[in-house]
Amino acid sequence: MMKAERWTSLHRVLMAVMIFTLVATVLPAEAKNYRLKFQMAWHTQHPQYKAYQEFIKIVKEKTDGQLKFTVFPASQLIGRNEALDGLKNGTIDMLASCGAYYHGMVPEGDVDWLPYISLDNREKFWDYMNKTGEGKEGEFHDIIADSYLEKANAVWLTNVICGSSGIIGRGETAYDTVASLKNIKLRAAGGVSTRVAKAWGACPVTMATGEIYPALQRGTVDALIFYAYGLKDYKFFEVAKTFSKPPVFTWADDLWINQQAFERLPEHLQTALKEAAHEWGRWASVTYWPRYEEENEKWCQERKVKFVTMDPENIKKSKEMLKEVWDWYANESPGCKRLVELAKEEQKKWSAGM
């Protein structure tokens, strides 16, 4: 009787082990979650920070919540100018900022800041810049992506063509001809914008964004190369009542992930992140920002800001004067030279309606 009871007990244990093994084999293991330290250059009220909330939403949907972010807005962890180095070293996992800030490190990355490169062709230019493929099909994209990988240890996920940079005039003065720009004190933020100011014959003045409002009040500057949304978001409309179009350039935002942080993700999450970035980048460039700028212009006009446009002859003159900025950029590296060649070829196709 005791033997039978022991056998029955042993049989029950064996059956329990078999059932547990079967259940463990059939039921999927709980999906592992991943969290990335994500720094943005933008404060929480900035329109681009708000656009990134849509990106985070898309990532959540595409990864079933497996990929999460700890977000640090307004360059909280690392100063803006050092942030790409921080990404390179793995201090942060992801970065949203402007390629123009890191021209000295990866000059190929701010090609989208060249004057008039996306004028009237925002959608076409974004598609061209983000197009991948074999051979010449994706060459433009690959030069940029390979440069970031080699020089910054960063996987370039996408860019966003954001706010239009035109000329904000102090008081009621409108700068809608090339001649009107000569010898004026023109605030420029450095890099491409300072070279643009010099090419026009203006006197570039460099100052932090926080110093602009009092400079406009005092007449330290006559005008700014600045984004139209600055009239509203920085309250420049109170002391500056004109904005001259077309935008000489459109500032662009970029999104990167540290290479090792990317490689630590499972393949399906890598794919989902890339897809989310591409989908969101196009939406932000083609839908979100044009809509935001349209609403901003209407808001400014209601507050007596006058939007003026250079006539075709002056636009032509301006383009001729700013060729030297393109030449400067082409001389920065072999990659920059090739990007300029490819961009000019593509612009000819757009002009021909191709």
Image: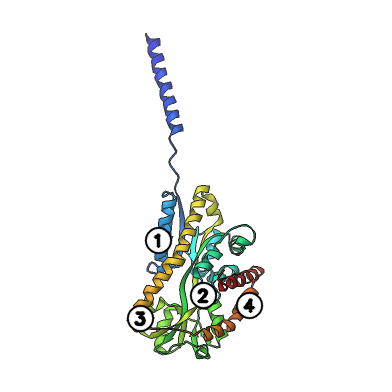
Point out residue 76 in the picture as x, y percentages from the top left corner: 44, 65
- According to the picture, the residue beneath numbered tag 3 turns out to be 301
- According to the picture, the residue beneath numbered tag 1 turns out to be 53
Camera-nearest label, 2 or 1 = 2
* Closer to the camera in the image, 243 or 154: 243
Residue at the spot x=48%, y=52% of the render?
A: 272
The relative height of residue 6 versus residue 46 in the rendered view (above or below) is above
Point out residue 159 in the picture as x, y percentages from the top left corner: 51, 65
- Tell me the SS state at disc 2: loop
Camera-nearest label, 1 or 4 = 4
Residue at the spot x=53%, y=86% of the render?
A: 313
Q: How crowded is mark 2: few (under 14 residues within 10 Å), some or many (20 or more)?
A: some
Q: What's the CA distance linking mark 2 and mark 1?
A: 27 Å
- Tell me the SS state at disc 1: helix
Q: In which quarter of the image is the C terminus?
A: bottom right
* Closer to the camera in the image, 87 or 177: 177
Q: Which colour scheme is used?
A: rainbow
Please identify the quarter of the rendering in which residue 110 is found. bottom right
Label 1 vs 4, first from the N-terminus: 1
Camera-nearest label, 4 or 2 = 2
Residue type, label 3: Gln
